Image (cartoon, helix red, strand yellow):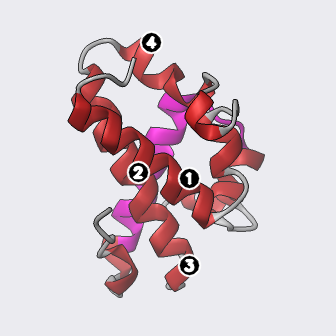
Amino acid sequence: MPETLVPGLTSKEARAALAAALCAAFDRWGLPPDKQSALLRVPDISALRRGEPLPENADTLARAGHLLAIDRALKKHYGDRAVLRDAWLLFSYPELGGQSPLALMLTGIDGIKRVRVLLESQLQSGHAD
């Protein structure tokens, strides 16, 4: 799995743009604020929704990079099939011990990375449905 370059971002503007992109992904995924905060490990997601940048914290930025990679991969695979694309995180998968990708991602950065690996491997093999 490629590493994300996002933790190296120090520009406030770049981190604000990342926050906006993540909030858009979270909205597409239909995630409530508490799950959004948990995925990024930030105490107040509403600050990001008001235009504040992501904190200059390596863990938060790494999470952001992997979550955006997941979102990009979902868009690539499902394209215009928005319902399937945005619901993918809610289906359970045997490869994840019967858990949904969202449930695994909520366990921490290792869960987020594992979901990214699963999705990218399914895309390479041509079956993420």
Q: Secondary structure at mark 3?
A: helix
17 on left or right of 91: left
Q: Nearest the camera: 8 or 17?
A: 8
- Can you tell which mark lies on residue 117? 2
Q: In this figure, what is the number of numbered marks? A: 4
Q: CA distance from mark 4 to mark 2?
A: 22 Å
Image coordinates of residue 108 in percent, x first then y, are 67, 62
Q: CA distance from mark 2 to mark 3?
A: 18 Å
Residue 22 part of the magenta segment: yes
Image coordinates of residue 121 in percent, x first then y, are 32, 42
Image coordinates of residue 103 in percent, x first then y, are 71, 41
* Of the image marks 4 and 2, the number of the one nearer the N terminus: 4
- Can you tell which mark lies on residue 2? none
Identity, as a three-letter code, of the amino acid under mark 4:
Val
On-image quarter of the C terminus: top left
Q: CA distance from mark 3 to mark 4?
A: 30 Å
Quadrant in which residue 33 is drawn: top right
Identity, as a three-letter code, of the amino acid under mark 2:
Val
Report the span colored magenta.
15-33
Quadrant in which residue 80 is drawn: top left
Q: Which residue is mark 4?
A: 83
- Can you tell which mark lies on residue 49? 1
Mark 2 or mark 1, whichever is nearer to me: 2
Q: Nearest the camera: 109 or 54?
A: 109
Question: Which residue sits at x=46%, y=72%?
Answer: 62
Q: Main secondary structure of the magenta part?
A: helix
Identity, as a three-letter code, of the amino acid under mark 1:
Arg
